[in-house]
Amino acid sequence: MRDDIRAETVSISGHAGDQIEAYLAQPLDQGSYGGVVVIHHMPGFDEWIKEVTRKFAAHGYLAICPNLYSREAPGAIPDDAAAAVRAKGGVPDDRLVGDVEGAAAQLRSLAASNGKVGVIGYCSGGRQAFLAACSLPFDAAVVCYGAFIVGEPPEGGPMKVTPLGHLAPQLSSPLLGLFGAEDRFPSPEHVAELERILRAQDKDFEFHTYPGAGHAFFATDRPSHRPEAAKEGWAEIWEFFGRHLSS
């Protein structure tokens, strides 16, 4: 852990060249660092996800979180922005890929970059991290309780997304999956299905499921937070990214 980091809001080039907001955090001391694109959860570009982005910098990574809701609700408070996006069925997949590609390019352009970049996502961002890793070249990918990678959204729900299991052959990097045993989306059955798909494609992956944890167990500002599961999950993240993103 280090205290000497800088964190700031920046503008990056996203899908179709759109300028979108992003939160960039990086160590201040000289060195060569791996990068992490942080994909925010459904509640959006909020205080917790910025804390997560700073956490990566404090652990020796260049980290950036693009605001996927920049277009629908520029300048809005996170809850309002998330509501506006939910009303439209979520972030379109092609736009997500373009925004993440722009965020990864921003990290690789930094003088302190060692050229390696990973992606991590939470909640809806977990699905989007899988999508990004199947669409773009990454060195490592982490899915934190990503719903609807397999399995259809419930009828009448706000999310207009489709499963992504068919993209598994295109997975570009090793994958770490962190799940709660009490979650419904994804349920343990969904996790098992994804595991079967990845195994059939001979992909490099590892999954961990935590008893007593449900959805959003990493989120320290929510009742769903499970400290022990989160602690173990972070340990897995540091070990995984340490292996795949170090110089």
Image: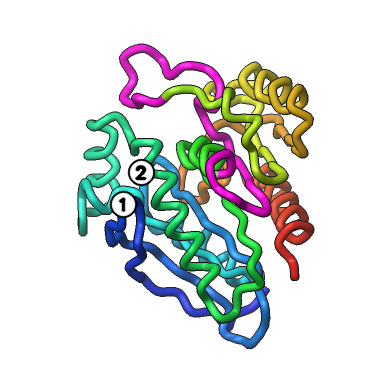
Q: Quadrant of residue 83?
A: top left
For label 1, count other residues whose C-alpha is less than 10 Å away and answer few (under 14), some (14-19) or many (20+): few
Query: Farthest top residue?
Result: 155
Q: Position of residue 22 (x, y in %)?
A: 38, 63
Residue at figure coordinates x 43%, y 58% from the top left: 102
Residue pictured at 31% horizontal, 52% vertical: 16
Q: Residue 60's x, y, as percent?
A: 65, 72
Residue where numbered disc 2 is placed: 95
Element at badge 1?
A: helix
Instruction: Say which residue label 1 marks.
Output: 16
| Quadrant in the picture for residue 197 | top right
- Mark 2: few, some, or many residues within 10 Å (few <14, many ≥20)? some
Q: Is residue 1 magenta?
A: no
Residue 192, above or below 131:
above
Real-space CA distance between mark 2 and mark 1, rounded to the nearest whole angstrom: 8 Å
Q: Tell me the chief SS of the magenta region.
A: loop
Residue 5 seen in this snapshot? yes
Callout 2 secondary element: helix
Task: Say what amino acid the circle numbered 2 marks.
Answer: Arg
Q: Are marks 2 and 1 in contact (CB under 8 Å)?
A: yes
The quadrant in which the N terminus is found is bottom right
Residue 159 located within the stretch drawn in magenta = yes
Identity, as a three-letter code, of the amino acid under mark 1:
Ala
N-term-proximal mark, 2 vs 1: 1
Front-most of residues 216 and 150: 150
Q: Is residue 234 left or right of residue 69?
A: right
Q: Is residue 86 above or below residue 34?
A: above
Residue in the picture at 57% in, 46% down: 218
Front disc: 2 or 1: 1
Report the magenta residues as a range: 133-161
Q: Where is the C terminus found, in terms of image quarters?
A: bottom right
Please say if 156 is above or below 217: above
